[in-house]
Image (cartoon, rainbow, N blue to C red):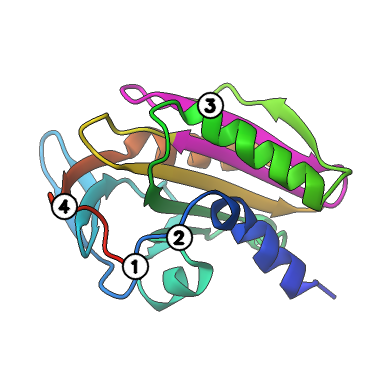
Amino acid sequence: MVNLTRVALLGSLIWVMAWAALGQSNTANDRVEGKDMHGLIVYGQGFAFLASEPNDWDTDTGQVAREYGVNAIFFPRAQSSRSHHVTIRVRLNSKTTEDPQQNMTFDMNQYKKQYPSTQFTDLAVKHPDYPTATKLFYTRNEFYEYVAYVNPGSQFNLVFSVAMSKEKEAATQDELAAFDHVLRSLKFVTQDVQGPPKQ
């Protein structure tokens, strides 16, 4: 039987430790298509960003996303991935630094305190336009968490967190390609001058 408490904790621990989240109550999405744009517009109180759904994945930006504490969550259609509880989650957080590597280092240290057996390795993925820090957090044969921090620019006081979780075994090439697809597709559109909403 799956330990749902541990799964939920692994899915959200990194973000909870790092920053306070943006409010999720008004998060929604619209699908957009065009010559240079396709996918989703994810928006809520004080923000809007673009994201693209990988082929054979489904997206939620409503109740399920709120339950995970994120702005958007992607679910694979493939049963082999679903059986390992694979999800890709995107969340905006308040920015504490312009260097996403500092966020990653902080989280690695906190995660190691919580789960001493956790190991880390580099990932060869990054956003084409925004500074990015990526790592794989894992305990062999238990969990694998692919993590990225993406800074959309100094003009915004928000940062993207992107994570993909998988139980028991490392991600397949198709799953890694989906993670890379979502990460590379992110584009921050707007932020209210008053900044993120207070909770």
In the rendered structure, which disc, 2 or 3, sits on the residue that comes first in sequence?
2
Residue 1, picture quadrant: bottom right
Q: Secondary structure at mark 3?
A: helix
- What type is the residue that disc 4 sits on? Val
Q: Secondary structure at mark 4?
A: strand
Frontmost of labels 4 and 3 is 3
What numbered label is drawn on residue 73? 2
What numbered label is drawn on residue 101? 3
Estimate the x, y position of residue 126 in percent, counting from the top left: 46, 25
- Label 4: which residue? 32
In the rendered structure, which disc, 4 or 3, sits on the residue that comes first in sequence?
4
54 inside magenta stretch: no
Q: Residue at x 68, y 35 (%)?
A: 136
128 inside magenta stretch: yes
- Label 1: which residue? 23
- The CA distance from mark 4 to mark 1 is 23 Å
Frontmost of labels 2 and 1 is 1
- What type is the residue that disc 2 sits on? Ile
Q: Nearer the viewer, residue 39 or 96?
A: 96
Q: Nearer the viewer, residue 69 or 73?
A: 69
Q: Secondary structure at mark 1?
A: loop
What is the crowding at mark 1: few (fewer than 14 residues within 10 Å), some, or many (at least 20)?
many
Residue 87, picture quadrant: bottom right
Please give the range of residues in magenta.
126-149
Q: Is residue 97 left or right of residue 158?
A: right
